[in-house]
Amino acid sequence: MEKKSFEKKPFEKKPPEKAKQGRPQHAGSVTHKHAGKEGADFKGIVRILGKDIEGHVLLRDALRRVKGIGQNLGLILNRIIRREMQVNPADTLVGNLSDAQMEKVEEIIKAPQKHGVKPHSLNRPRDVETSQPAHFLASDLMFTQRQDIEREKNTRSWRGWRTSMGQRVRGQHSRTTGRTGMSVGVLKKAIKAQKAAAATSAQDKSAPKEEKK
């Protein structure tokens, strides 16, 4: 059989493509994902428990933007809102809700245990002061966390002592990771190097004196 010979084509360098000229991203009005669903009394910005949320966000997603509400509790609150308010959070924009509806939503969020949420779904199943299930949100949650840390420090518990020392609390390794302040291992090496340098310099100084004797 005859072997086919292939000719090598010379490499042709393509000219650089010109950048497409168009409108910059900031020019004109920004189109939202749920644009076109605005009602007559649509609000551009809605405030829920001190959190400013854009009106084009669905109520389902807006609940999880509040500090203290996670994915699991958000799903439970969605079912409660759908049952008590006859509103579907998965298809309702926050900006379309009336003031009365927003007050009802905030009431459900502030006290979910009063609307059938079980204690194990709350961030405080048994409060230290009241011994009752409670759920803290936003600034109340941050204030309560600081109080808990100070209480642990004042009682000199293991967690409080480790926290005051700036160390890890939950039993993690701290020999190689999470080292803060003056690292012990590096300090030992530096001291050994300084001692070795001092010893060699002392030997060099004492050598000429011995030769004169």
Image (tube, rainbow, N blue to C red):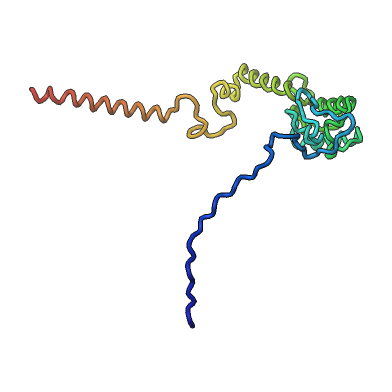
Q: Is residue 169 left or right of residue 112?
A: left
Q: Residue at x 83, y 39 (%)?
A: 90
Q: Residue at x 70, y 21 (%)?
A: 144
Indicate the position of residue 166 as horizontal and vertical percent values. Answer: 55, 24
Q: Is residue 194 left or right of residue 145?
A: left
Indicate the position of residue 67 as horizontal and vertical percent values. Answer: 73, 28
Residue 142 sits in which quadrant? top right
**Who is closer to the viewer here, 183 or 54?**
54
Indicate the position of residue 114 as horizontal and vertical percent values. Answer: 86, 27
Indicate the position of residue 132 as horizontal and vertical percent values. Answer: 79, 24
Residue 164 sits in which quadrant? top right
Q: Is residue 172 left or right of residue 185?
A: right
Q: Residue at x 56, y 24 (%)?
A: 162
Please say if 25 is above or below 156. below
**Who is closer to the viewer here, 92 or 186?**
92
**Who is closer to the viewer here, 70 or 171?**
70
Pick out the residue farthest to the top. 154
Quadrant containing the C terminus in the rendered view: top left
Residue 76 sits in which quadrant? top right
Please say if 170 is above or below 21. above
Pick out the residue farthest to the left. 213
Please say if 8 is above or below 110. below
Q: Is residue 15 left or right of residue 117?
A: left
Pick out the residue farthest to the bottom. 1
Count all numbered tags in the image, as a single digit: 0
**Who is closer to the viewer here, 200 or 113?**
200
